[in-house]
């Protein structure tokens, strides 16, 4: 049976007719990479965030995510992917000079944990905003458990070039302001990335196996997995268990009706979830004996609790709600959040992956994007879960708009549509990076054994290693490599100054005692 795909690029054709295809190049890219700190024995670190790295609350580039041991590195936006990767490398080199004998885990799924109690919640000091961040994490622990929050990944941030937006707006019949036009087109992009985002899990998923210790706090979940060995559970055809219902998916959130058809609809529906009480969460308690257990008892405490694979983003001012920042100033960039750590890459992401993602995002932007119908979100979730659990299964079918479609056929069509975009980007850069990256992914579709998930299971089998020692050996190798790389004194000094400045900002925040925390929190949620 043959399947037809409408993956044409009408917007690219118009760009080429106007000889304006070069406007696709130069979009800003940024990376956010999480890594779990572990001790020499492979156990999750119990030490605080190293003071020499600065204050996690106020540092622009080196912070923590859920746990005090879960580091997060952020690169500034750059028009050149290699610049972003170089910045990420410099962060790693500086951090490794202050980790003593600890290292960073190179895998997404946590190893070396001993139940929820072994995972220290991140601390951000005594300022109001610092307390809010910590209490939010307490709430996550109550709702989902700490173990899920110790999972690590990479976020790929992308901002469409402003000259491209201006070109499209000028040539459209749209009489609305440019900012409104940009927001609408970003949501067109987001819907397509949600529809086709399962491809990222198939191509780059690297979490097909999990340590049995991951299930200590939720033993009932272990029953759905096969035994790889006495210490490892897995699914034979899994790609990214990180992005499955044992990771960053939850049954409660899957039922949310978040509107992706417009910015106003998105803000309204997400705000509704933040403001709507949820009896099971209310029953957990909010304030007990003078201590906050969670920020509120609503469906979502704040926007960040909604674990979508793609988020519209706007830079928020200090203390400003993210939804309010979007409402006031529109969409500035998108955040693609579905990348597992690449265990074979010391930085957690390979250059070819980054080049591919830029071309993939632009291809989704250049395609038409029908509005979501009531069952669209269900299909997005269905496809993501199927690929996460069994993406390499021969003959796997996914839910298309008009019936089931073989994954391999759909993936090939998506990659074929990318070819002209890769050619445009390579022409602008004077390189072959984008086409080479595309060819690597096409090979994975033709041969699933080339995917990172398959290669991980093959390596574990040939070495006769459970997941934990396999990941630990890779992590040690990457740590040694990064520690031995030359690190210019000017870069070391730069990061030292950034750390000192962040500590000074933290101290300034903590000296401001003008507003009690309860009042600060009420004001935060009252923002309109």
Image: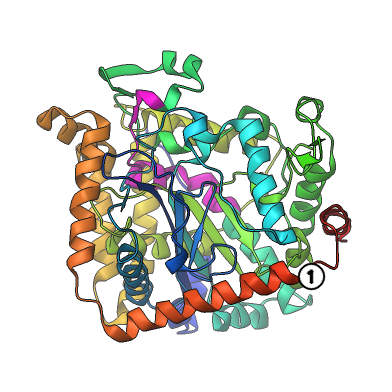
Q: Is residue 427 left or right of residue 120?
A: left
Q: Quadrant of the C terminus?
A: bottom right
Q: Is residue 295 visible?
A: yes
Query: Is residue 17 in the magenta section?
Result: no
Tell me where residue 199 appears, x and y as whole percent: 41, 45
Q: Is residue 270 left or right of residue 5?
A: right
Q: Is residue 229 left or right of residue 498?
A: left
Q: Is residue 196 left or right of residue 486?
A: right
Indicate whether 322 appears above or below 140: below
Task: State the residue position of label 1.
Answer: 328
Query: Toward the viewer: 125 or 155?
Result: 125
Q: Residue at x 74, y 72 (%)?
A: 329
Write down the quadrant of residue 509 in the picture.
bottom right
Q: Residue at x 26, y 45 (%)?
A: 40
Indicate whether 289 appears above or below 81: above
Tag 1: Cα neighbours inside 10 Å, few (<14), some, or many (≥20)?
few
Main SS, magenta region, reads helix
Write down the quadrant of residue 33 in the picture.
bottom left
Tell me where residue 331 appears, x and y as whole percent: 67, 67
Write down the quadrant of residue 363 in the picture.
bottom left
Q: Which residues are magenta?
A: 191-213
Which type of secondary structure does the marked residue at label 1 adopt? Answer: helix
Query: Toward the viewer: 123 or 166?
Result: 123
Tell me where residue 519 appears, x and y as whole percent: 88, 56
Residue at far left of view: 462
């Amino acid at each position: 049976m043959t399947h037809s795909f409408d993956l044409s690029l009408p917007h690219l054709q118009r760009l080429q007719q106007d000889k304006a295809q070069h406007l696709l190049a130069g979009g800003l890219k940024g990376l956010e990479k999480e890594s779990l700190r572990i001790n020499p024995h492979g156990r999750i670190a119990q030490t605080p965030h190293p003071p020499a790295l600065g204050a996690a609350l106020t540092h622009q580039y080196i912070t923590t995510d859920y746990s005090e041991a879960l580091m997060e590195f952020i690169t500034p936006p750059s028009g050149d992917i290699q610049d972003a990767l170089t910045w990420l490398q410099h962060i790693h080199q500086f951090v490794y000079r202050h980790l003593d004998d600890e290292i960073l885990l190179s895998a997404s799924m946590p190893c070396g944990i001993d139940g929820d109690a072994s995972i220290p919640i991140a601390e951000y000091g005594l300022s109001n905003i610092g307390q809010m961040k910590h209490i939010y994490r307490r709430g996550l622990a109550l709702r989902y458990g700490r173990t899920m929050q110790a999972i690590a990944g990479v976020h790929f941030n992308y901002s469409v070039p402003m000259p491209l937006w201006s070109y499209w707006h000028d040539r459209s019949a749209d009489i609305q302001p440019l900012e409104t036009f940009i927001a609408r087109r970003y949501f067109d992009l987001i819907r397509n990335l949600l529809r086709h985002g399962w491809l990222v899990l198939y191509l780059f998923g690297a979490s097909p196996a999990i340590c049995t210790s991951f299930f200590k706090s939720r033993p009932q979940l272990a029953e759905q997995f096969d035994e790889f060995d006495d210490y490892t559970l897995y699914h034979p055809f899994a790609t990214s268990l990180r992005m499955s219902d044992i990771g960053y998916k939850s049954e409660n959130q899957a039922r949310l009706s978040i509107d992706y058809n417009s910015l106003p609809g998105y803000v309204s529906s997400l705000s509704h979830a933040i403001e709507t009480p949820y009896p099971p969460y209310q029953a957990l308690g909010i304030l007990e004996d003078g201590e906050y257990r969670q920020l509120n008892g609503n469906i979502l405490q704040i926007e960040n609790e909604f674990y979508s694979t793609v988020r519209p983003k706007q830079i928020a001012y200090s203390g400003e709600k993210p939804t309010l920042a979007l409402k006031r100033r529109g969409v500035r960039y998108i955040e693609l959040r579905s990348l597992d750590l690449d265990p074979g890459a010391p930085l957690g992401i390979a250059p070819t992956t980054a080049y591919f993602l830029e071309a993939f995002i632009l291809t989704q932007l250049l395609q038409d994007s029908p509005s979501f119908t009531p069952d669209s979100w269900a299909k997005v979730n269905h496809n993501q879960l199927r690929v996460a659990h069994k993406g390499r299964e021969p003959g796997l079918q996914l839910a298309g708009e008009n019936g089931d479609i073989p994954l391999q056929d759909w993936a090939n069509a998506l990659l074929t549509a990318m070819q002209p975009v890769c050619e445009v980007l390579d022409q602008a850069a004077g390189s072959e990076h984008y086409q080479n990256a595309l060819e690597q992914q096409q090979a994975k579709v033709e041969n699933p054994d080339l995917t990172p998930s398959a290669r991980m299971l093959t390596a574990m089998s040939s070495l006769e290693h459970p997941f934990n020692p396999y990941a630990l050996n890779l992590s040690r190798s990457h740590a040694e490599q990064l520690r031995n790389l030359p690190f210019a004194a000017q870069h070391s000094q730069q990061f030292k100054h950034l750390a000192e400045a962040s500590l000074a900002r933290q101290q300034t925040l903590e000296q401001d005692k003008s507003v009690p925390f309860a009042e600060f929190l009420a004001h935060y949620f009252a923002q309109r």
